[in-house]
Amino acid sequence: MKINGQSLKSQYINEPIKVDGKLSESVWEGILQPLALTQRELFEGKPSEHKTWIGIAHDAQNLYIAIRCEQPRHTITAYELARDFNVQLDDVFYILIDTYYDKRNAFVFYTNPRGARGDYQVFDNGKATNLNWNTVWDVKTSIDSAGWTAEFVIPFISLRFESKSDSTIWGINFERNIRYLREQSLWMGWKRDSRLNLVTNAGQIHLSNVPNSKKFTEFKPYGISGVGGQRNGENSLNWRSLVNAGLDINYLINASYRLNISLNTDFAQIESDRQQVNLTRFPLFFPELREFFLEGQDFFDMGFGGDRIIPFYTRRIGLDSNYQPIPILAGVRLLGKSKGTTLGAMSIQTAKTNNAIAENFSAFSMRKDLGIQSTVGGMTILRINENYQHTTTGVNFRYSTSHFLGSKNLNIGGALVGTATSQTALNNENFAYRFFVQYPNDKFNIFLSTQQAGRNFSPKVGLMRREDFNEYFAIINYQPRPNPNGRWKWIRQFVISPGSVTLTRINEGNRLQTFQYSFSPIGLETRSGESIYLYATRHAEGIFVPFRIFANTIIEPGEYWFTRYSAELSTFRGRKIWFSGNYSIGQLFDGRSTDVSVDVNVRTSRFIQFTLLNTYSQGMFQQSGFDVLLTSLRVRYAFNPNTFGFILAQYNSATQEYLMNYRLQWIPFPGADFFFIANQTLRPLPDRGLTTASVNVMGKLIWRFVM
């Protein structure tokens, strides 16, 4: 391997490599080279405190990357073992690979000294990431007195790229985090206005004799066996067997396009949603947790951002209005990119149940690269059943540059979306739009946006937290860094917000719905990893119909002005015990409320960690009041990087309901998984106390075959 400025060259090899983290093969002796890493934190522009060595090689099937990280053994921090581990806790090494060399999209692989694995996707030059993406690859590590070593193996079939007949160029970058020094160092793009996910700043890697794409098919059958019980009223549990089977098929059409087929799709291993308290008149947002919908989710992004208008909200698929599962009979998805054009297509068929009719959900998207970092695209979403056909169609654009005023980042974008059904056509009231300007840099971070939704805009596969509204939003953050040798050297960065303003009006009569002005007089992050923020916020809410804020508390129509104060505190997450907290107090409509949230984390060893989260809200109004406590305890455990799981217990004082989740995951080899899952819900019954309302216990095996 050769390093020449911003360019690397991978060595083609014929001899086999045993991936064990030892680098004992002779091939590595001539390949390992010093890697010049430069600090982004704490001391921008200075060389990394400890040396790093790198070697890159490939054969006809795999890409191999060897890393040697020098540092004294007693300073190495490595507690995490589970897949997609918490990177804020350990020493971590990242590898970013831009296989299309489009300076926009990339795959990131990372590990710690214990060999824990993590990966994610980067889209649109860091605009979005998919942290839940998982592919087939492996890494092994070893620790000695002078540092630690990692050996990565990434199969070419796990990556998407355009085949070249001779030399292939990809983008590549590296980041090393040394926890005891609070150091973050990169190979390229180390300035504070940059970061690893800004793909445009990556260097190059040249590969010769990269294999031409071969059509291959990956089969992943699954089987489930278990029992479940459901209580109806005060009767005893009704038990049933839980037996199911299905198949996922991944067909590599070529190196750029991949077809996924899912038959009898199942999500039994997904953990429960976190309990939330809703003290607003708008629906809550719950994130997507199902793997089938998470992979490639940026392909189906309309470009709206935020959570006010989400034209394509995949939790509408396979879940009813109470978020209870609806069986998915089959799904098909095509994702890929070629010659600057990104294509995505997906179709899902759900089954008919006692509470839902059979439906088909489909989405089609196309995005074209413009210039170096900009894009323009379009998307159509269909929801079809026996009663009607609903269509959501939109276009979006994004202009991005990392060379504004020399080396600053600037993003300008927008989207226009319309909805129609088989009974109604598009008109002016069926549209929504959004336009934004973003200046995301280290010293100043500025965001401006405007959006509007018409009276009849109703995306049936989307989420509308507000309807028939127009909104303006602006925020300015000033983030200076003190002199590292001066009086305030213990502070890494100030974060001061002169103002964050939101103004939302109902289109009909242009009536005020929400006004919010938030001012942060002080916010800071210390060099030791602590942070504190203070806020004062002035609110106005226009209420047009009575709404129930809590069980016995009604907010009557009117215009309410009130002020609230809040504080946030967090300690360094690299310690064995760390916590974060939020305290908010002040007026709320015609009353007062206090909200407290405390998150305590304890690491007893690299095998077990505890997280206790308590959220308490108290409200006092003219005629009534409320107290509600949400408590959750998560115990994460790991025996090794291939065997790990969690226990999650949640309590809601409003419903007096307890939720229990247990999951054990074993990875016999990359691409295969075994899950043991147990879920239990407990509720109080009159004269019987706390009683099991439902329980499920099951095992799920997923295997992998390649042809």
Image (tube, grey):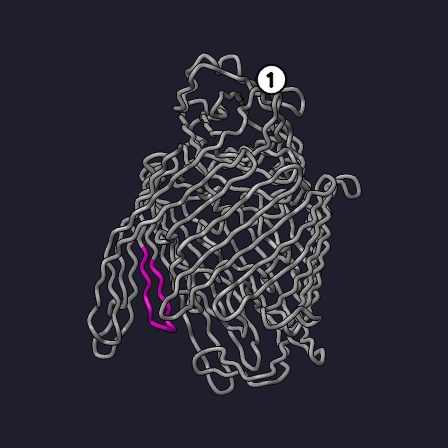
Q: Nearer the viewer, residue 615 or 360?
A: 360
Which residue is painted at 53% across and 60% down in the image?
Answer: 313
The residue lying toward the viewer, choosing from 73 and 589, is: 589
Category of crowding for the residue at label 1, using alpha-carbon neighbours closer than 10 angstroms: few (below 14), some (14–19), many (at least 20):
some
* Above/below status of 701 relative to 690: above
| In this view, 234 is above or below 217 | below
Q: Say whether residue 268 is visible.
A: yes
Q: Which span of residues is magenta-colored?
A: 649-661
Q: Residue pushed farthest bottom?
A: 623
Asked which secondary structure carries label 1, the reply is strand
Residue in the foreground of this view, choosing between 424 and 64 = 424
Counting from the top left corner in percent of width and height, residue 465 is at 57, 68
Q: Main secondary structure of the magenta part?
A: strand
Residue 312 drawn at (x, y percent): 56, 59
Whether residue 405 appears in magenta in the rendering, the answer is: no
Residue displayed at 39% across by 61% down: 351
**Badge 1 is on which residue?**
2
Where residue 673 appears, as percent x and y from the top left, is 34, 41
- Tell me the quadrant of the picture where the C terminus can be found: top left
Can the viewer see residue 180 in this picture? no
Q: Is residue 380 left or right of residue 412?
A: left
Query: Which residue is located at x 54 percent, y 58 percent?
Result: 568
Report the number of discs: 1
Coordinates of residue 555 in the picture (x, y in percent): 54, 83
**What is the three-letter code of the residue carrying label 1?**
Lys
Q: Is residue 656 magenta?
A: yes
